[in-house]
Amino acid sequence: MKYIDEFRDGDLARKLAADIRREARPEREYGLMEFCGGHTHAIFRYGIQGLLPDCVHMIHGPGCPVCVLPIGRVDNAIELARMPGVTLCCYGDMLRVPGSGRVSLLKAKADGADIRMVYSSADALKIAQENPERQVVFFAIGFETTTPPTAVVILQAETLGLNNFTVFSNHVLTPAAIGAIMQSGEARVDGVVGPAHVSTVIGSRPYEPFSAEYHMPVVIAGFEPLDMMQAILMLIRQINEGRAEVENEFTRAVTRDGNLKAQRMVDEVFELRDTFEWRGLGWVPDSALQIREKYAAFDAEKRFELTHASVADHQSCECSAIIRGVKNPLDCKLFGSVCTPDNPIGSCMVSSEGACAAYYTYGRYREAQKQDQT
């Protein structure tokens, strides 16, 4: 199958693994952070970690929009859903994320709130068209990948003259979050595997400023196992040679400038927020988007006068430290016992792209055995 089988070839994987072992210097440690949750799952699903020498460590970053959404924003969504006459539309992963007091959107739905799971922003717009007597709110989350479709439905709603459709915008920006992690200095990161889907939209250029500022190698990679292994090899070579450049392994989908049409559409509808709260990272300047005043009629925060309150995570949950790359899921005492995909305590276990979900699905026994041996 073109563009799949070529990137899962066993002979090529063994050759790449041999190249990585030969070029990684055993006298030093390599901390490589993959920002995207899809990369985390690829690492565990294909057993890539087991092919790497002991000196190469993969660190899991905050690359899942569900994982990084703070509890206060979940509480805002529940508040919206409970308002009379309001229908809240959201993606499936958000339904089970606990808000304050372990109340989730799923619990609010069971209590009678009109909450509907959608697969796209277009689904939410259609629900608004079909239910003119209801105020329909789309709970928009995501990195740069999902922002263009949200911009499209806002423009469509304006064209259609809909007055019962609004968006609760929680769109966040990748480069700002990576920069915040580098600035904190908490995690030992020597190189970054750049996200794939996000980069198809924004291109590779936005990573160049922090790569230069923090002398940090970045290699953008696809999601197939050979993509990941090639990116790891490219990062090790940069580190060994003392280089800090932005390289693009995912050339079949990513360019330096990205999707300019999508960027123009996003810029038409959205503008930077001065600051935004991230789970694990706290308040990060210029890291999220809000709807421009020109389209304020479609901004749920303004129409329903929402106010945000910071809420602390569950005191035993380590999601915040995992998102910052300081700990891994097995460091959390709730992992696999109290906290499971069927009974998630933290957001990293809820989301299908979360680091805890990846460990639980593919690697919990293997990694636990490795820790016992050490």
Image: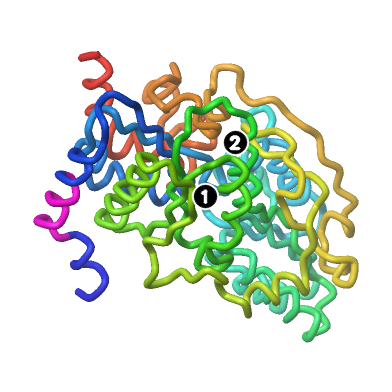
Above or below, 314 against 306 in this view is: above
Q: Quadrant of the N terminus?
A: bottom left
The residue lying at 62 percent from left, 44 percent from top is 213
Indicate left or right for 155 with 370 as reference: right
- Give the percent coordinates (x, y) of residue 111: 66, 43
Note whether residue 103 is visible: no
Q: Residue furthest front?
A: 241
Locate residue 186: give its quadrant: top right
Quarter of the rendering occupied by the C terminus: top left
**Which residue was labeled with disc 2?**
181
Q: Are marks 1 and 2 in contact (CB under 8 Å)?
A: no
- Using the image, determine if residue 172 lies above or below residue 166: above
Per the model, the C-alpha gap separating discs 1 and 2 is: 25 Å
State the predominant SS element of the stretch in magenta: helix
Kind of residue indicated by mark 2: Ile
Q: Is residue 101 left or right of residue 57?
A: right
At 35% from the left and 27% from the top, the residue drawn is 29
- In primary-sequence order, the first of circles 1 and 2 is 1
In-front residue for pair 35/366: 35
Magenta stretch in the rendered image: 9-17
Task: Please state the horizontal and vertical placement of residue 85, each as a whole percent of the image.
Answer: 80, 60
Q: Amino acid at mark 1?
A: Asp
Could you classify mark 2 by the number of other residues whose Cα lies within 10 Å: few (under 14), some (14-19), or many (20 or more)? some
- Residue at 61% over, 59% down: 206
Residue 39 rendering spot, x and y as whole percentages: 38, 49
The reply to whether the magenta stretch includes residue 12 is: yes
When the figure is inspected, residue 116 is found, relative to residue 60, above or below; the finding is: below
**Which residue corresponds to the image point at 22% horizontal and 43% vertical from the top-left?**
20
Q: Give me the disc on residue 93.
A: 1
Q: Is residue 275 left or right of residue 2?
A: right
**Judging from the image, what secondary structure is the residue with disc 1 in?**
helix
> Is any part of residue 218 visible from this angle?
yes
